[in-house]
Amino acid sequence: MELQAVVSTLESGEQDTVLKVLQVYNQEKSQCFTFEDEEREERKKMAQLLITFLERELQPSCQVTCLESIRILSRDKHCLDPFTTKEGLKTLSRHAGIDYSEELIREVPDLDVILESLKCLCNIVFSSAMAQELTAQGRLVVGLARRIKLYNERSLPHDIKFFDLRLLFLLTALRVDIRQQLAQELRGISLMTDTLELTLGVKWLDPYEVATEEGLLPPLPRQETERAMEILKVLFNITFDSSKREVDEEDAALYRHLGALLRHCLMICADGEDRTEEFHSHTVNLLGNLPLKCLDVLLTPKVRPGSLEYMGVNMDAVSILLDFLERRLDRGHKLKESLTPVLNLLTESARVHRQTRKFLKARVLPPLRDVRNRPEVGNSLRNKLVRLMTHIDTDVKHCAAEFLFVLCKESVSRFVKYTGYGNAAGLLAARGLMAGGREEGEYSEDEDTDTEEYKEAKPNINPVTGRVEEKLPNPMEGMTEEQKEHEAMKLVNMFDKLSREKVIQPMGVTPSGNLAPMENAIRSIADERSSSDSDLGLD
């Protein structure tokens, strides 16, 4: 249908005729996601007429058709101006039943009208900074929060709940002020935690342990999974800085309550492998936002028949996180986005919980037996993580190294033993530990246990590569002392030339364990010796 004909019909304003014309237009354009530039002005005019037409008293079927047309037009980022006005957004939010008002909403709109309006708002908010600004000013999040709070009392269809949550996710992702408003003024963490609990359909066995109503762990149905993932994304947005700040006992109890639900999310699966992976991914992302002291809820549940027990503690959740990490490693896709959240979560859990660290070390860094291959060669979890320590992406490299370092109780000698000095050098240089030593941390004093194979091979292990190297012939064998001195001077001159031409810069380790240009390192060592001599009263 010609766009001009649709515009002319809208200008006439006859409801029945407009309904018929828009139904034909919607059917033709239902799968249209690209638009011709020549008709842009006509589409803008149509968009303005649709908003004006929607203000009239219309039958619900006509409202739905009109909103479907708005949804199609909202796919064109160049034609959003008529929708991104205070009046236009108020019209759409009123039809969605979420218009902020001090009085109660005068009438509950038709459910199909609500759904189409929410879809329109999602498109417009996603594509327009002006719409985002106006929805913040219009306090749209308050109307959304009011309706979400009533999910337990009102029987709303899945699609409406889903798009409520999708719109809330977009608003909190795109606007910091809305994020803060939901978290603080509207007590969003408590609200969304209650909504997640309702969606999962759980009951409490103990203060921080949940189970399904049937006491089993069947797959979460598709619709509940979709809503749960939107809730997890909203919670991620509004708890983004929680792990970095101190929380009082009241907030800690709230985060532990949420953490117990997230543990339950890890323990259940969704409908299908890919959906389960996505569901667990959002769960891991959110767990990483919880205050560190609240992660103890991962270990809280009692050991029951079928549970994985270690040192008297239920390690089911930690084991699932480790399996999740290994699957992400094997997939090898978008490593930064897929690996860093779970690596950071496991690192911090291991740092604050001794049982978690010892369990992870037993699984990731078991006592060394294979000392013939480099630490990065092989298919064990240790090999895969050591390979990441020289990854091109700095964040991935740092996270993998930090995880292994914590499992080694931040001991340089133990870290080098499992990874090789060459792989470990990046983290040690960044920490100022090139000269050895140990970071300050609250770790037990138990010693690392060595296998007989390791003890036997230890004197022959090259600390740089982390393996037993084949003995190479001595290149200076048979040379006279003068020839050796001549070769040594040639090497010195070559290094000197490369250094003067700025091809390389010789580095040394300062007494504090940091890397520094060689002349600075030598000066630091000389200064330290001079200071030491003066303290002893030596001339």
Image (spheres, rainbow, N blue to C red):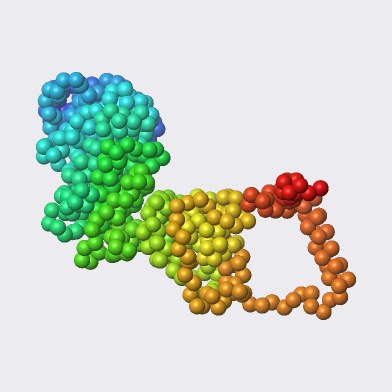
Locate residue 398, reporting x and y percent: 51, 52
Asked if residue 454 shows in the view, the reply is yes
Q: Is residue 217 above or below residue 40?
A: below
Report whether 280 appears left or right of 477: left
User: Farthest residue in the right direction?
Assistant: 482
- Identify the image quadrant of residue 407: bottom left
Q: Which residue is at 84% across, 63% downward?
A: 489
Point 16% across, 28% down: residue: 17
- Counting from the top left corner in percent of width and height, residue 120 is at 26, 33
Look at the image and tell me whether residue 335 can be seen. Answer: no
**Between 39 and 530, the one nearer to me in the picture:** 530
Q: Is residue 94 above or below residue 275?
A: above
Q: Position of residue 195 (x, y in %)?
A: 20, 41
Question: Picture coordinates of residue 417 (x, y %)?
Answer: 54, 66
Q: Is residue 237 above or below residue 347?
A: above
Residue at image position (41%, 40%) is 244
Residue at x-position 19% and y-position 51%: 206
Query: Looking at the figure, which quarter contains the N terminus?
Result: top left
Left or right: where 290 falls relative to 511: left
Work out which residue is located at the far front of the displayed protein and give it. 537
Q: Please determine whether, in this image, residue 336 is positioned above or below residue 491.
A: above
Question: Of residues 21 and 451, which is closer to you in this image?
Answer: 451
Q: Nearer the viewer, residue 277 or 264?
A: 264
